[in-house]
Amino acid sequence: MENVSLKSKINEIRYELSKKMNKSGKNDYSNYNYFQLKDFMPQALELFNDKGVYTEFWISRDKYELPGKTTITRAFNENGEVCNEIETKEENFEYKEFAHLIAINLDNEDDVIELTKETADVRLQASQPIQNLGGKSTYMKRYMYMDLLEINENDKVEEETGKPVKVETKT
């Protein structure tokens, strides 16, 4: 049996999925339609299963060190020479959240694609903190799968102006 690469499998899934997608999400405030998870995940999961691709999504919270303040304390002897020097580094860090999506070729589990994006806060109107957490997870999952599957929304600038976006190139 031929060993098909994960990239080839994902390309086939992208092609098949692109033939049968419709946007069901509607933003009445800004007047545009968008893809919801339910618009593509059932078909995507079926295609992943058919092609032997496993996917998993999660959000991690990781500690990142930032540049800290360094202080040098020197002691001098009676001749004015440095006899002792102590360097103290102040710890400085922050926590960042990242969304991860991994795709694994079930025919060769060393053949892996992993996508990672920093998350953003979600504040849904009149909601509880747990609902905001669920909203973040849902938004990030949708965006991560849309990246993996190259599902594109219309260009917002072009949609609003009705004109293609001009890109200048230099030769």
Image (cartoon, rainbow, N blue to C red):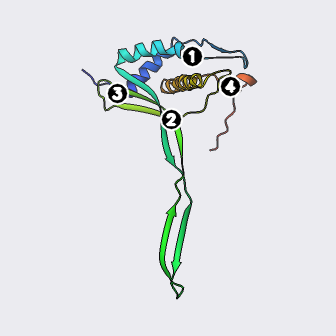
Q: Name the residue under label 4.
A: 156
Check disc 2 and report its element: helix, strand or loop: strand
Of callouts 4 and 2, the N-terminal one: 2
Assess whether mark 4 and mark 1 are in contact (beta carbons under 8 angstroms).
no
Would residue 124 appear left or right of 96 to someone viewing this image? Answer: right
In the image, 134 versus 154, the foreground residue is: 134
Check disc 3 and report its element: helix, strand or loop: loop
Mark 4 or 2: the one toward you: 2
Q: How many labels does the image show?
A: 4
In the image as oriented, which residue stretches furthest toward the right? 161
Of callouts 3 and 1, the N-terminal one: 3
Mark 3 or 4: the one toward you: 4
Assess whether mark 1 and mark 3 are in contact (beta carbons under 8 angstroms).
no
Q: Mark 3 points at which residue?
A: 5
Give, as a three-letter code, the residue at label 2.
Phe
Estimate the spatial distance between the alpha carbons at disc 3 and disc 2, rounded to whole Å.
27 Å
The quadrant the C terminus occupies is top right
Give, as a three-letter code, the residue at label 3.
Ser
Dividing the picture into quadrants, the one containing residue 51 is top left
Question: x, y percentage for residue 34?
Answer: 62, 17
Q: For the point 54% across and 27% down, which residue is it?
A: 140
Q: Mark 2 points at which residue?
A: 98
Give, as a three-letter code, the residue at label 1.
Gln
Q: For the point 58% across and 23% down, which residue is it?
A: 135
Q: How crowded is mark 1: few (under 14 residues within 10 Å), some or many (20 or more)?
A: some
The quadrant the N terminus occupies is top left
Mark 2 or 1: the one toward you: 2
Of callouts 3 and 2, the N-terminal one: 3
Estimate the spatial distance between the alpha carbons at disc 4 and disc 2, rounded to whole Å.
25 Å
Give, as a three-letter code, the residue at label 4.
Lys
Assess whether mark 1 and mark 2 are in contact (beta carbons under 8 angstroms).
no
Picture disc at residue 36: 1
